[in-house]
Amino acid sequence: EPEVTQTPSHQVTQMGQEVILRCVPISNHLYFYWYRQILGQKVEFLVSFYNNEISEKSEIFDDQFSVERPDGSNFTLKIRSTKLEDSAMYFCASSGGTPNTEAFFGQGTRLTVV
Amino acid sequence: KNEVEQSPQNLTAQEGEFITINCSYSVGISALHWLQQHPGGGIVSLFMLSSGKKKHGRLIATINIQEKHSSLHITASHPRDSAVYICAVRYPGGGADGLTFGKGTHLIIQP
C-alpha cells in the first residue's frame, strides 16, 4: 500500500540552528501539507502546497518557515532559526486529485530543540 | 476559523463494548475526517465523509450535515482499538485548505 514517508523520525537540534524535515508524499498525489503537534496538544495546520506553490498557510507559518518541492518527489519543511517552542511532532500529509479526498499522513518527525 | 469539539475527551471501556465518539462543528464544512493516532504518534486516516455513513470492518462513521455533527462507532471493541481518535474538518474555500483538528478522544479498551 502506498505511504507517505518522513525522515528523520527524530531530530535534536540546538536553538538557533536551521533544520530541514523531509517528506516523500504518495507519488500521484497533488496536494501536500505540513502539520505540527506540540506535546499534549491538538494537531495544527501549518501550510498547504499545490502546483508548486503555497496554497494556504496558518499564522504559525511565519518567515522562519519555508517549504519546497525541490525534485518532484521530496517535500521539505525548513525552519530557519529554531526556537525552543518549535519542539513538536511534525506531520507531512498528501491527498490525491482534489483536496477533498482522503488524507494520508506520514509517521511524523519528532523535533526537539535544546 | 471555528473550533471542532469532540466528546468524550477520555473513554475507558471493557472489551466487547459498543463505543461512540462524537464530533461537532459550528459552520458548514466540505469534508470531515476521522483519524486514529497511536501512542507512537503516527496518524492513520480512518474515514473521510461529506455526507451519510461509511463502514469499514468494525468501524462506522456517520455525519449529519444539518446538525453539524458526526459520530464514530466501534462495534465489539478490542484492546487493540486503544488509541486517540481525532475528528478533523475542512472548511470550504479556495485552494487546498488545511484541516482543522479536534483535541481527540483518548480511548482505552480493557481486556
Image (tube, rainbow, N blue to C red):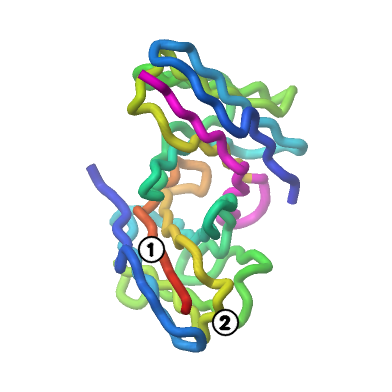
The part of the chain drawn in magenta is B91-111
Q: Judge by depth and name the residue closer to the eye, B3 or A15.
A: A15
Q: Is residue A98 above or below residue B63?
A: below
Type of amino acid at the residue the image marks with label 2: Gln
The kind of residue on which mark 1 rests is Thr
| Residue at position x 50%, y 69% in the image | A87
Chain of the residue displaying label 2:
A
Quadrant, the C terminus of chain B: top left
Lower position in the chain sequence, tag 2 or tag 1: 2
**Residue that appears at 58% across and 37% down:** B31
**In the rendering, at what x and y percent does residue B41 appear?**
40, 50
Q: Is residue B30 magenta?
A: no
Residue topped by disc 2 = A64
Label 2: few (<14), some (14–19) or many (≥20) C-alpha neighbours in 10 Å: few
Label 2: element kind: loop
Q: Position of residue A37 (x, y in %)?
A: 53, 57
